[in-house]
Image (tube, grey):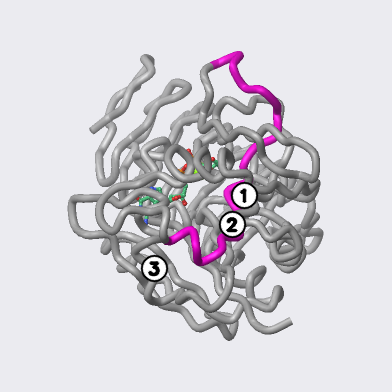
Amino acid sequence: MSYLKAVILAGGFATRLRPLSCSRPKTLFPIVNKPLLQGIFEELASSDVEEVVLAVNALTQFHIKQQKLSKCGLKIRYVIDPPKTPLGTAGSIKNAEKLVGHDKSFIVLNGDILTSIDYKQLFNVHVNADALATIALCKVDNPCRYGVAELEEGNRIKRFIEKPAEGQAPTNLINAGVYVLSPKVFDYIPERGYCSIEHEIFPVLAKEHRLFGHMFNGLWMDIGKPEDYLLTNKFILDRLALANELKTFKKAKVEMPIAVDTHVVVGKRTVIGPYVTLGKNVVIGDNVQICNSIIFSDVKIGNNTIVDGAIIGEGAIVGENVHVNKRCIIADQAKIRDNVSLNEDLAVCPAKEVSETILKRNIIC
Ligand code: GDD
Ligand code: MG
């Protein structure tokens, strides 16, 4: 097969991952210490994709360039949403029209999805069906958070409804956030401004009988919400089963699975795991307990502290004898003083300092 092109949509504002997403786009969130986008590049490069267009906003482009990801041999270009006016999913695909060209169909994927989908197979299904668009579909328990497809014979999509109201989803088959588009779809998208492919284009293509679905059963996860993000890391930790981490800490106890990046220091009588990822240069004191948590790089955690089911952003400092409870999110560079307890579901904004115990669900800004 000749080479393929892909557009990665990564210019959303990731509001559901705030305040962690205030300082990094969703597509750069680490999954077991590797930026999600890096994993996407690797998957695409191994699927005959040679050219990638990243549809982003200017800030996301800045962050991606700073990360210096390996391009995996891909030719990577950017299209930028205009300042202050996001283009939506279809608008940003239209923005990529010149770079993508009209010579053949192309793959589109959401930049917040971790999946093992076979892109080549999806492309072939699309070409054989003579479709205008072919959406990868997977089954989920709660379809209302996603785009839902109703299939008819021959894998044609009869109806496509984006985020139906609770109880209104006709099936539990959802848009996996990966699809192939014929260049003719560019003609359906207005020249300028905001347009959503899920709300405005897929329903029209379904009415014209030119929208198809392709079921797949492999790995699929959307990191859009904190609990999804924690779950995705947990799932990958289980699959990787990194046995050699045990050697890393001589005086600490490890409960597998965990993953540890380079230059990590862990004190005496500390217990790490299960389901913990420690980013680069993390320093953890003595008698600390961390489980079910994601610790970004350059974090410091003081003696006698407990972190249970939380996410701690890059460069954050957590003092001694602190208790960070379930679903807490501490954003980049925040500081939690000694002897503070953070109750469940608490979020601390970037670079904020917390010096007293917080019991209510809250966002500290
Ligand atoms: N450039 C650009 N501009 N990108 C955008 C914009 C925009 O205005 N808005 C969203 N995106 C990007 C996001 O960064 C993300 O990678 C992708 O488009 C999808 O946006 P989300 O905000 O994550 O959408 P969602 O998760 O609620 O729903 C989408 O994904 C589901 C699968 O996870 C839809 O495509 C659903 O139909 C689908 O089921
Ligand atoms: Mg999403």
Counting residues from the N terminus, which is met first, the one under dot 3 or under dot 1?
3
Q: For the point 25% across and 56% down, which residue is it?
A: 192
Q: Amino acid at mark 2?
A: Leu
On the image, the x and y values in percent for residue 251 come to: 69, 54
Give the x, y percent position of residue 195.
35, 47
* Residue at mark 2 to residue at mark 3: CA–CA distance: 17 Å
Q: Secondary structure at mark 2?
A: loop
Earlier along the polypeptide chain: callout 2 or callout 3? 3
Judging depth in this view, the residue of 254 and 131 nearest the camera is 131
Work out how far the residue at label 3 is from the one at label 1, CA to CA, in angstroms.
22 Å
Q: Which residue is mark 1?
A: 210
The answer to whether the residues at label 2 and label 1 have Cβ atoms under 8 Å apart is yes
For the residues carrying marks 2 and 3, which lies nearer the camera in this image? 2
Tell me the number on the disc at residue 96: 3
Q: Is residue 173 magenta?
A: yes
Number of residues whose C-alpha sits closer than 10 Å to that of mark 2, classed few (under 14), some (14–19) or many (20 or more): many
Residue 61: percent from left, percent from top: 33, 67
In this view of the protein, which residue sits in the foreground, 126 or 109? Answer: 126
Mark 3 secondary-structure assignment: loop
| Residue beneath the point at 62% across and 47% down | 211
Is 27 on the left-hand or right-hand side of 84? right
Q: Is residue 336 above or below residue 171?
A: below
Residues rendered magenta in the picture: 166-186
